[in-house]
């Protein structure tokens, strides 16, 4: 009975996100899905809170002690999950600011949306050997961001216990790259076909 209850809550979060994508998302040239009206520019706080709660339910027993995301679009979802799980959130930066010490881990990440490569970094002060890290991001496409974040975790001698994406674009194959590293992948909306006027979910 309890299992059915949690499954129902998960399906509710997935349905909410899928409906938002269908009703408000826009497919742009080059296979880009524009969701800035509710997920990564203007934020639907009720939706994001529901996504965070769903992530917390899925990974309640994973043993994570830290959530890792990359600026900027993944922050709100990671924060919502962190609140529900009672965990701190570490944000990988795309630019080194003066208040970050020289001791950092770095990794290159190519942005599919912006067609640029960034070097992301985190302070060694906040990512350490022994940490069990849950990665949370807004999108999973080719897996470039995921590989960069996994590299940061490996450099620190920490362990990745899972990768979460709010939206996964299955056609681009990122899931396989992550699973080949032995990391569980969980996404709330899995898009199997993305065309203008035609979005199909798994």
Image (tube, grey):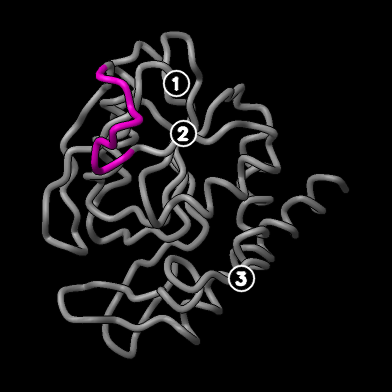
Local secondary structure at mark 2? strand
Residue at the disc numbered 3: 15
**Closer to the observer: label 2 or label 3?**
2
Mark 1 vs mark 3, CA separation in Å: 35 Å
Task: Give the mark nearer the N terminus: 1 vs 3.
Answer: 3
Determine the residue positioned at 61% across, 57% down. 51
The quarter of the image holding the C terminus is: bottom left
Mark 2 vs mark 3, CA separation in Å: 28 Å
Q: Which residues are magenta?
A: 93-102
Residue at the disc numbered 1: 126
Determine the residue positioned at 21% across, 64% down. 113
Cβ–Cβ below 8 Å for labels 2 and 1? yes
Dominant secondary-structure state across the stretch colored magenta: loop
- Circle 2 packing at 10 Å, graded few (<14), some (14-19), many (20+), is many
Local secondary structure at mark 3? helix
Residue at the disc numbered 2: 90
Local secondary structure at mark 1? loop
Counting from the top left corner in percent of width and height, residue 116 is at 11, 55
């Amino acid at each position: 009975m309890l299992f059915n209850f949690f499954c129902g809550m998960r399906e509710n979060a997935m349905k909410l996100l899928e409906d938002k994508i269908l009703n408000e998302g826009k497919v742009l040239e080059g296979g880009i899905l524009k969701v800035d009206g509710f997920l990564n520019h203007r934020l639907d706080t009720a939706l994001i809170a529901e996504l965070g709660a769903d992530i917390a339910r899925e990974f309640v027993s994973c043993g994570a002690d830290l959530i890792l995301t990359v600026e900027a679009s993944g922050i709100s979802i990671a924060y919502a999950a962190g609140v529900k799980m009672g965990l701190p959130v570490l944000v990988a930066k795309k630019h080194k600011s003066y208040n970050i010490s020289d001791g950092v881990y770095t990794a290159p990440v190519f942005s599919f949306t912006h067609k640029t490569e960034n070097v992301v970094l985190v302070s060694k002060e906040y990512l350490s050997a022994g940490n069990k890290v849950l990665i949370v991001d807004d999108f999973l496409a080719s897996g470039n961001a995921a590989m960069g974040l996994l590299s940061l975790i490996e450099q620190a001698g920490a362990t990745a216990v899972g990768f979460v994406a709010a939206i996964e674009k299955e056609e681009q194959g990122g899931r396989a790259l992550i699973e080949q590293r032995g990391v569980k992948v969980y996404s709330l909306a899995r898009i199997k076909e993305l065309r203008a006027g035609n979005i199909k979910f798994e």
